[in-house]
Structures are given as structure tokens and as C-alpha cells.
Image (cartoon, helix red, strand yellow):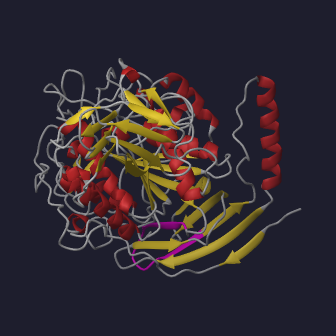
């Protein structure tokens, strides 16, 4: 039976777009931004997906949304033989024949501004599929294979930029990518700009949006910092499977290796003295000492193309050591990646952000503890999404030395603590990576190939915070209280539900592993020494070997810990346990974060 229905809705202009170049239209006909394209995912209800673009001034723009009545498969189907493949194809053809007649047409219209820009919002849509027809009366563009689902922005530096072909078991992972057709991928080209830009280019040379599959990922022998982001992909894939394949997932990767947080931050974020609302005005110490020039320089690494845009070329050379680590990129100044790689995405609707960055700020943890929450709060404001979830990766195990291009300060211990300042904001989650370092990575020890575990842990966090799914542990043992005892000891208890099956396990690539415990204690002289630790039920009991009381306790406060504290079962490379976050506890706290060293 045909279910063809028609709704006629007229929406006023809802979002004022910046001019592409100057505030005078240079478009004679309809033009869409790069990332409004076929195969994309638009944000599902309760948010309203937004469409935007440019055309001649004061022109009527008409949009027809053809919503197909099918829904994504209830589960991820993996075909193991030709018979199953034929059966699945027949079923899909039968479903398509049925759905050809089961569509709802929704008409939406608006008019362009004097500068030619236009924008409108669609009525809220449930998870599903659609086609979109956009016309200005002379030019018509049809976008096919559109999905409504949940869209995530993935950003950061090289550990976010590192692509799937650089991960462990890359060949098998690339082949497996064909099984997730409702997982859609988009990559933003690396560009810097003096001023906010209205559009960005695609980093992938063969698509703007693509279905997950080998053709959407770089081949195994290509540059390992190309497309698509491994951290972003494995996160999205695991979340897609967690949701049973019922919700399409859109991933937009916008990252650039070697960059400090200041270049991703808007001028408003950099001027925020409240550190994103985590501290009273005037108490934040967010002045950065990270070297970011006030104006970009013309270099071989980031050539200056014109007065507005600076692009990263395929021949871009990073400061590298002989083991391939990426250093700071010369020529990118504060807010310039915000201008060119984040600002053009502001009209898009996202449900969350995934962030992997901090290595380039390792020498300035005090500033980072302010700049990071300030950036999060500012992004929520700039996107107009106060409920935007934000998930970050705490930096993985890494031990720097004099040969490293990026000198790790105190082996990242303090920058990890500074990252955790963001947990003072609502709807922020963290994936711990202290146990999944990779000292023999061909991409440099700072670039662990264990991105599957990073993605899994992010997906568990997102499932719990964004969707309320807590079937498994979504975080490792989380310190709740410390009770000092009369025999120079201490009993550590953990948040309920995070310390089930508490156990020690060797970290990835460990050598001594758990020959000694990962705990240290501080005595009255201020000296830190390794101590023994006993597990009793869901608690940890530690003792100070010398006389006196314990004044401080540290867990995994080092570059490459050999032993980690886990819940669940197993260690770093299995799928049943999660590690505790490194921490520093003080008996007489100063009221300042551990990143201050006070």
C-alpha cells in the first residue's frame, strides 16, 4: 500500500552564515558547502538538522526532504559465505521495492540574504534514511543516500590524525570496514586561516562523505597520517555496534598533528579567565607559554597561499627525529585552525565531540588546565549546543628523552592531570590510555598503534554518558576515599561499580610488568618511594615502609608504567577490563590541581 504523504512547511532564516570571502555575493547559482553531500549523516531528533549554502542574493531556496520509511538493520550483519550474501541481497532488494512507495515528502523553504547566504532547519527526524532535493529555481542539487542518526566531531593532534592504516592489524581492520554501511565518514583538510572561513575542503581525495568501507580508508602502504582517523573510526564502529546498528553514526574528523590547543581555540576561548566556568573570574592561570606565533610565517611546512588561507601540502615536512615523531608545526598561530577547520562546521549539528590532544602542551600543564575547559565551553557556545557532550583521551604511556622531537615534561604526568580539569564540566567523559603505549611503533613511540582499545574505551564512555547504557564497565577503578591507618598505612576505596574484580595486570609491551606495584607514597620528608600494595575485596591496602604517616599517594605517575590497576578481567589488549586513571592524592591538599605541582 502506498503511504505517500506530503507536508508543507516554511521556515525563516535561522542561522546567519559568514560571507565566503567578502560580504558581497559571488555566486550566480546554488552552491553547497563541502560537507553537505550525498552519503552524509544528519543529526536525528531531538535536534533539528540544518542545511545551508549560497546563491544569488534575495533568491528563494526550496528544499524537498524525502524520508524513506525504512530503518537501519537491528543488528550488524556479517556475511560469511556466498549463500548468505545472495539471501541478504534478495532481502535488501525486496525491502527496497517496498520502500520505494513508502515515503514522506517534506517541503521547506527560505530566502538568501543580501550576501547570498542561506540556512534553514529541517523538522526533527527519527533515525532513518532520506533523499534531499535543493533548488534555487535555476540549479537543482539532489543528495542521495542520506541518513539521520548521531553525528560526532573528532579533533585534536597527531594521535587523532593517525589513520586506520597505521593501526595494529590494519589490513584486517580495513577489510572489516565494509560491514558497517550506516557508519559514514568525512575528513576535513588541514588548513589554517587568519580569519573565520565559511567552508572547508575534504582531506580525502575521492569523497566528501563515504560509507564505511575499504575505499573510504587509505591503503596499508600509504601515509599513516592521511584518512580516515583511526581513533575516530574505531570509536564510531564500536558505538555503532553497541547501538545494534539501529542508529547511523556520522564521523567528521578535523585534526592536525603537532598542534597545541591554542590553535583550535577561538579568540573568545583564549580570553576566558573563568576557564570555561570551572573557576571564578580572575583566578584562572590560562596564560599560555606554548610557542604559537601571533602571525603565521611563510615556510616550507605551511606555505602561505594568499592573504586569508594557509594550506598544508602533501609534501609537508614535520620536525621529526629519526624514529618519525611529529614535532610542533612551524607557522600556525593561535585560533588559525579554529578559523579554518572548526568554524566552517558551526552550522552542522553534532551530538558530541571526541578529542585527542595535549602532547604539544606538555610543557605548560598549568595553562592547559584552564585552556581545555575554556575551549569546551566555548565550542558549546559557538555551536549553539549547550548540551554538546565532550569526550577526550587521556594521553597514552610515553617516556620522552633527549632524542625526542617533543620533549615530554615529567613523562606527561602533569599534562594528564591538567586534561582532567575538564571533568569539572557537565557531560564530559575520559578514556584512559596509560596502559596502551607502544614503544616500538614505526610511527614514533608517541603514536601508539593500539587505537582499537582507545576507540573501545571512548565508545564505552559515550554509551554510558550519552545513551545511559551501562551494561559493562565504562570506566576503570575510580578513587573515592583514602583512609589513613595507625600502622603507617592507608586503605583506598573506589566509586561503587568501578572496582569489581579488582586486579593488577601488566601494561602493553611491559618488560618487568607487575614485579612491583604501580603505587608510590610520600613520607614526611617529601620523598616519593615505591610501595607494596595488597588487594582486599574492592579496596587497595598500602603501607609506608619508613616511620611516620603517609602524606601522599600516587598511582602510575610516570611515563611508561609497567603495571596497572584494572577492574573486570584481563589487561590492556583484551575486551573485559579497564585501567584506573593515574592520580596523585595529598593528605593535606592545597586546593590546587595536581598539575600545579603544589
Quadrant in the picture for the N terminus: bottom right
Relative height, residue 94 to residue 166 (above, below): below
Which stretch is magenta? 49-63
Q: Is residue 278 magenta?
A: no
Res 506 → quadrant: top left
Picture coordinates of residue 147, whole percent (x, y): 61, 54
Residue 353 can be seen, yes or no: yes
> Residue at horizontal 21%, vertical 50%?
365
Q: Nearer the viewer, residue 390 or 224?
A: 390
Picture coordinates of residue 489, whole percent (x, y): 35, 41
Q: Is residue 56 magenta?
A: yes
Residue pushed farthest right? 1
Picture coordinates of residue 560, whole percent (x, y): 30, 29
Residue 182 can be seen, yes or no: no
Q: Nearer the viewer, residue 351 or 515?
A: 515
Relative height, residue 471 to residue 265 (above, below): above
Amino acid at each position: 500500500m502506498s503511504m505517500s504523504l506530503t507536508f508543507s512547511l516554511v521556515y525563516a532564516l535561522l542561522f546567519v552564515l559568514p560571507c565566503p570571502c567578502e560580504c558581497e555575493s559571488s555566486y550566480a547559482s546554488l552552491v553547497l558547502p563541502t560537507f553537505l553531500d550525498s552519503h552524509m549523516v544528519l543529526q536525528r531528533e531531538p535536534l533539528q538538522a540544518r542545511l545551508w549554502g549560497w546563491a544569488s542574493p534575495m533568491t528563494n531556496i526550496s528544499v524537498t526532504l524525502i524520508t524513506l520509511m525504512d530503518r537501519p538493520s537491528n543488528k550488524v550483519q556479517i556475511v560469511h559465505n556466498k549463500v548468505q550474501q545472495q539471501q541478504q541481497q534478495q532481502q535488501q532488494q525486496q525491502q527496497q521495492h517496498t520502500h520505494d512507495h513508502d515515503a514522506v515528502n517534506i517541503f521547506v523553504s527560505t530566502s538568501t540574504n543580501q550576501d547570498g547566504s542561506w540556512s534553514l532547519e529541517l523538522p526533527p527526524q527519527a533515525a532513518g534514511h532520506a533523499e534531499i532535493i535543493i533548488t534555487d529555481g535555476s540549479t537543482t542539487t539532489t543528495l542521495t543516500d542520506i541518513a539521520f542518526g548521531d553525528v560526532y566531531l573528532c579533533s585534536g593532534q597527531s594521535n587523532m590524525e593517525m589513520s586506520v592504516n597505521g593501526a595494529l592489524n590494519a589490513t584486517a581492520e580495513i577489510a572489516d570496514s565494509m560491514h558497517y554501511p550506516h557508519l559514514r565518514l568525512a575528513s576535513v583538510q588541514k588548513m589554517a586561516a587568519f580569519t573565520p572561513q565559511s567552508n572547508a575542503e575534504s582531506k580525502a581525495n575521492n569523497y566528501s562523505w563515504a560509507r564505511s568501507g575499504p575505499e573510504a580508508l587509505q591503503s596499508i602502504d600509504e601515509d599513516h597520517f592521511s584518512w580516515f582517523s583511526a581513533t575516530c573510526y574505531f570509536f564510531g564502529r564500536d558505538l555503532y555496534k553497541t547501538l545494534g546498528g539501529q542508529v547511523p553514526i556520522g564521523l567528521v574528523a578535523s585534526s592536525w598533528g603537532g598542534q597545541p590547543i591554542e590553535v583550535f581555540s577561538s579568540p573568545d576561548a583564549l580570553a576566558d579567565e573563568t576557564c570555561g566556568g570551572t573557576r571564578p573570574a580572575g583566578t584562572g592561570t590560562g596564560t599560555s607559554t606554548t610557542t604559537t606565533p601571533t602571525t603565521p610565517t611563510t615556510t616550507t611546512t605551511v606555505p602561505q597561499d594568499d592573504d586569508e588561507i594557509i594550506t598544508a601540502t602533501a609534501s609537508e615536512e614535520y620536525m621529526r627525529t629519526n624514529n618519525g615523531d611529529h614535532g610542533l608545526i612551524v607557522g600556525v598561530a593561535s585560533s588559525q585552525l579554529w578559523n579554518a577547520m572548526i568554524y566552517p562546521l558551526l552550522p552542522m549539528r553534532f551530538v558530541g565531540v571526541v578529542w585527542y590532544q595535549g602532547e604539544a602542551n606538555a610543557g605548560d600543564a598549568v595553562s592547559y588546565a584552564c585552556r581545555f575547559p575554556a575551549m569546551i565551553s566555548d565550542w558549546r557556545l559557538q555551536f549553539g549546543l549547550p548540551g554538546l557532550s565532550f569526550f577526550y583521551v587521556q594521553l597514552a604511556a610515553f617516556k620522552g628523552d633527549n632524542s625526542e622531537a617533543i620533549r615530554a615534561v615529567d613523562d606527561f604526568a602533569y599534562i594528564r592531570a591538567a586534561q582532567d580539569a575538564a571533568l569539572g564540566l557537565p557531560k564530559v567523559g575520559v578514556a584512559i590510555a596509560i596502559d596502551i603505549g607502544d614503544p616500538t611503533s614505526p610511527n614514533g613511540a608517541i603514536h601508539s598503534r593500539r587505537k582499537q582499545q582507545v576507540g573501545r574505551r571512548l565508545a564505552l564512555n559515550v554509551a554510558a554518558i550519552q545513551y545511559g547504557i551501562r551494561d559493562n564497565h565504562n570506566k576503570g577503578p575510580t578513587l573515592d576515599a583514602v583512609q589513613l591507618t595507625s600502622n603507617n598505612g592507608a586503605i583506598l576505596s573506589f566509586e561503587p561499580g568501578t572496582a569489581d574484580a579488582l586486579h593488577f595486570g601488566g601494561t602493553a609491551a611491559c618488560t618487568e610488568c607487575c614485579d612491583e606495584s604501580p603505587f608510590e607514597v610520600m613520607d614526611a620528608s617529601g620523598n616519593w618511594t615505591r610501595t607494596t600494595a595488597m588487594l582486599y575485596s574492592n579496596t587497595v591496602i598500602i603501607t609506608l615502609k619508613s616511620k611516620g604517616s603517609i602524606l601522599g599517594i600516587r598511582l602510575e605517575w610516570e611515563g611508561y608504567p609497567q603495571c596497572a590497576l584494572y577492574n573486570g578481567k584481563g589487561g590492556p589488549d583484551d575486551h573485559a577490563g579497564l585501567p584506573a586513571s593515574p592520580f596523585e592524592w595529598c593528605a593535606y591538599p592545597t586546593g590546587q590541581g595536581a598539575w600545579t605541582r603544589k
